[in-house]
Amino acid sequence: MSLRRISVHVDEPDPGTFYWVLMEEGDDASQWVEHSSSAHPYKAWRQALTEGCLALMSLAEDDRYGPRTRAEDEDASPVGVPAA
């Protein structure tokens, strides 16, 4: 299992209205896609950032290692090839 590349940032679509946003690296290292965002605004940037960090940490099954991808079964048959 490898560590997922997820970032957190704060968006301010209107003055004084802050939302946390989690972005995850896509198939290409230069591509980032939105993973999730806050459902409601926060009145302070710091509060939105703190809640975003908590959302990111909640993705980890074990907080010692962070959010992980599931490893592929290297012994599995390739797509389209029947198992022997």
Image (cartoon, rainbow, N blue to C red):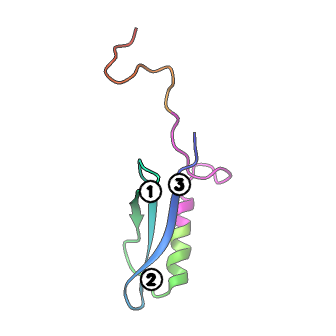
- Looking at the image, the residue that sits furthest to the bottom is 15
Q: Earlier in the sequence, mark 2 or mark 3?
A: 3
Where residue 45 appears, as percent x and y from the top left, is: 51, 84
Of the two numbered discs 2 and 1 on the same chain, state the one appearing first in sequence: 1
Horizontal side, residue 23 vs residue 79: left or right? right
- Judge depth for marks 2 and 1 and give the one in front: 1
Mark 2–mark 3 Cα distance, whole angstroms, equals 25 Å
Q: Is residue 29 above or below residue 71?
A: below
- The answer to whether marks 3 and 1 mark residues whose Cβ atoms lie closer than 8 Å is no
In 3D space, how far apart are the residues under numbered discs 3 and 1 (Cα atoms)?
12 Å
How far apart marks 2 and 1 lie (CA) works out to: 29 Å
What numbered label is drawn on residue 30? 1
Magenta span dominant secondary structure: loop
Q: How far across and down, in percent of the image, does residue 16 sit? A: 42, 91
20, 82: nearer the viewer: 82
Numbered disc 1: secondary structure:
loop
- Residue 42 bears which disc, if any? 2
Looking at the rendered structure, the kind of residue marked 1 is Ser
User: Residue 35 at x, y = what percent?
Assistant: 41, 59
Magenta stretch: includes residue 64:
yes
| Extent of the magenta region | 54-71
Tell me the mark number nearer the camera, choosing from 2 and 3: 3
How many numbered callouts? 3
Asked if residue 55 lies in the magenta stretch, the reply is yes
Q: Secondary structure at mark 2?
A: loop
Circle 3 is placed at which residue position? Answer: 5
Name the amino acid type tagged 3.
Answer: Arg
| Image position, residue 22 (x, y; %) | 46, 64
Q: Residue at x 55, y 46 (%)?
A: 68
What residue is at 53 percent from the left and 62 percent from the top?
56
Classify 42 as above or below 2.
below
Q: Is 43 above or below relative to 77?
A: below
